[in-house]
Image (cartoon, helix red, strand yellow):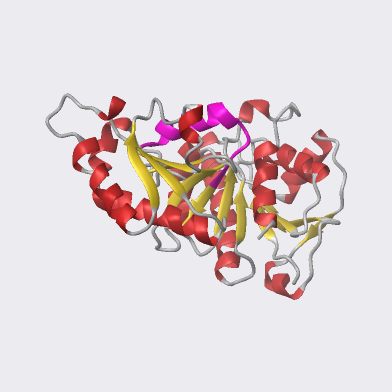
């Protein structure tokens, strides 16, 4: 059976996605047809900047299911980006461009055209305007499913219980229900999509899993959930102090670490693997993946960006 296409939202138009995309398709061949959702004008401009040559094939949404696609061309769903010299209005135009790109992608995944979606890096502060914590939440709202963020590496992955939440708000969100939900999502995703058993370590919230306050989450909340999940047959241990769980001898025992907040687990993982990781949204009826870095506007047009994370993202979906 022919592989389903991979949709790629180019993301922030002033980031390095196009450079990464050109490098990705130069280095690897993929069986899944790649379909870009972007502004054709921007694409052509960046092809000139990066000295990349390939024919472009424009795809019309109304006829998208009636055609066969391959990677002999750059397949493009053209979303026009309007330009204004007025900075405030330009931000509105940029948000509209990104929203339309996501709307098209989500429509195509929901109507069965494909379930494989990659979005390029996006400046969340400008696009989300504090209405969502991140792109994970922005996409997940369309499916009304319990979801989880997985920063995936074949050797070790991490899942933050809370995502882009200010530290002062994290403790308020820690609950038995939320921890239980994330564990179930991890366990199910590893079985269904990765075809392996999740071996989960759970970190504590406090340094050394200790607290000077009367109420200690690491004693009153986390152990009870872990014991319940062990009885359900899930391979899980903890809570572990976050400052030692990533030591080599410890992390060898697990393939995924559930942390209580974003930087508690993403910081160590990026220090260990750098660009060799991808961001996957678990729990959705589609496979949404993104690179594990931002748009990096400062590197635009310098041809120095590392495409490793995008290559990993495409390869991950290309196998499915």
Q: Which quarter of the rendered picture does the N terminus lie within?
A: bottom right
In the displayed structure, 206 sits above or below 229; it is above
User: Viewer-proximal residue, 39 or 155?
Assistant: 155
In the displayed orientation, state which residue is furthest to the left: 214
Q: Measuring 44% from the left and 63% from the top, which residue is drawn there?
A: 143
User: Viewer-proximal residue, 128 or 154?
Assistant: 154
Q: Position of residue 125 (x, y in %)?
A: 46, 37
Which span is picked out in magenta?
261-279
Q: Position of residue 312 (x, y in %)?
A: 67, 44
Q: Main secondary structure of the magenta part?
A: helix
The image quadrant that residue 86 belongs to is: top right
The answer to whether one can see residue 90 in this image is yes
Q: Is residue 70 left or right of residue 101?
A: right
User: Viewer-proximal residue, 133 or 221?
Assistant: 221
Based on the picture, tell me whether residue 183 belongs to the magenta stretch. Answer: no
Q: Is residue 301 left or right of residue 246?
A: right
User: Viewer-proximal residue, 157 or 161?
Assistant: 157
Q: How many marks?
A: 0
Based on the picture, tell me whether residue 274 belongs to the magenta stretch. Answer: yes
Q: Measuring 48% from the left and 60% from the top, which residue is drawn there?
A: 284
Q: Measuring 33% from the left and 53% from the top, which residue is drawn there?
A: 230
Q: Measuring 45% from the left and 61% from the top, which residue is drawn there?
A: 142
Q: Position of residue 258 (x, y in %)?
A: 40, 42
The image quadrant that residue 153 belongs to is: top right
In the displayed orientation, state which residue is furthest to the bottom: 66
The answer to whether one can see residue 78 in this image is no
Q: Which quarter of the rendered picture does the C terminus lie within?
A: bottom right
């Amino acid at each position: 059976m022919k592989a389903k296409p991979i949709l790629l939202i180019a993301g922030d138009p002033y980031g390095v996605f196009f450079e990464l995309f050109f490098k990705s398709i130069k280095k690897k061949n993929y069986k899944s047809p790649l379909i870009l959702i972007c502004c054709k004008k921007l694409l052509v401009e960046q092809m000139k900047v990066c000295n990349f040559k390939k024919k472009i094939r424009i795809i019309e949404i109304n006829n998208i299911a009636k055609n066969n696609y391959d990677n002999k061309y750059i397949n493009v769903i053209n979303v026009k980006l309007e330009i204004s010299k007025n900075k405030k209005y330009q931000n509105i135009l940029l948000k509209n461009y990104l929203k339309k790109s996501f709307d098209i992608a989500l429509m195509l995944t929901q109507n069965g055209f494909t379930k494989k979606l990659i979005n390029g890096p996006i400046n969340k502060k400008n696009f989300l305007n504090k209405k969502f914590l991140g792109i994970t939440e922005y996409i997940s709202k369309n499916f009304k499913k319990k979801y989880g963020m997985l920063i995936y590496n074949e050797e070790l992955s991490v899942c933050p219980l809370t995502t882009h939440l200010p530290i002062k708000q994290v403790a308020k969100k820690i609950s038995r229900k939320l921890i239980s939900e994330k564990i179930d999502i991890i366990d199910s995703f590893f079985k269904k999509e990765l075809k392996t058993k999740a071996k989960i370590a759970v970190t504590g919230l406090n340094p050394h899993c200790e607290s000077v306050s009367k109420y200690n989450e690491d004693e009153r909340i986390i152990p009870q959930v872990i014991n319940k999940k062990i009885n359900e047959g899930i391979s899980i241990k903890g809570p572990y102090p976050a400052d030692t769980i990533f030591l080599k001898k410890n992390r060898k025992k697990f393939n995924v670490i559930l942390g209580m907040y974003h930087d508690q687990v993403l910081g160590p993982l990026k220090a260990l693997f750098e660009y060799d990781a991808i961001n996957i949204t678990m729990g959705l009826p589609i496979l949404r993946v993104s690179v594990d870095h931002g748009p990096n506007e400062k590197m635009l047009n310098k041809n120095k960006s590392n495409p490793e994370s995008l290559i990993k993202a495409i390869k991950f979906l290309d196998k499915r």
